């Protein structure tokens, strides 16, 4: 089940707090390691680190 979008605010140091429900739905917890990268056109992608590394090793890039 996908949750309704939540509007977040970027803090003065660039930090963003993600709701626990959103993290849980994505299979992430407070201590999970993630990779963040810009996908252009105003999008930022957050991925589980192990998934991103596996894709990078397999394809040579992140999609």
Image: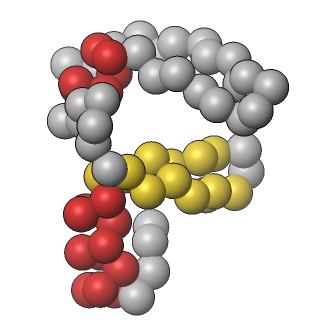
From the viewer's perspective, tell me whether residue 4 is left or right of residue 43.
left
Write down the quadrant of residue 16 in the picture: top right
Q: Residue at x 59, y 47 (%)?
A: 44
Q: Position of residue 36 (x, y in %)?
A: 51, 53
Locate the N terminus by quadrant.
top left
Write down the quadrant of residue 35 in the picture: bottom left
* 19 lies above or below 10: above
Tell me if residue 26 can be seen: no
Tell me if residue 22 can be seen: yes
Locate the C terminus by quadrant.
bottom left
* 26 lies above or below 38: above
From the viewer's perspective, tell me whether residue 7 is left or right of residue 33.
right
Q: Residue at x 29, y 86 (%)?
A: 57
Q: Residue at x 44, y 71 (%)?
A: 62
Q: Position of residue 27 (x, y in %)?
A: 19, 36
- Pick whichever, 36 or 43, lies toward us: 36
- Pick whichever, 7 or 1, lies toward us: 7
Q: What is the number of callouts on the image?
A: 0
Farthest-out residue, right: 12
Q: Position of residue 45 (x, y in %)?
A: 50, 49
From the viewer's perspective, tell me whether residue 39 is left or right of residue 11.
left
- Pick whichever, 20 or 58, lies toward us: 20
């Amino acid at each position: 089940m996908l949750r309704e979008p939540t509007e977040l605010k970027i803090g003065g140091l660039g930090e963003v707090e993600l709701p626990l429900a959103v993290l849980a739905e994505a299979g992430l917890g407070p201590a999970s390691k993630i990779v963040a990268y810009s996908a252009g056109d105003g999008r930022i992608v957050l991925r589980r680190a192990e998934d991103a590394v596996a894709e990078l090793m397999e394809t040579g890039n992140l999609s």
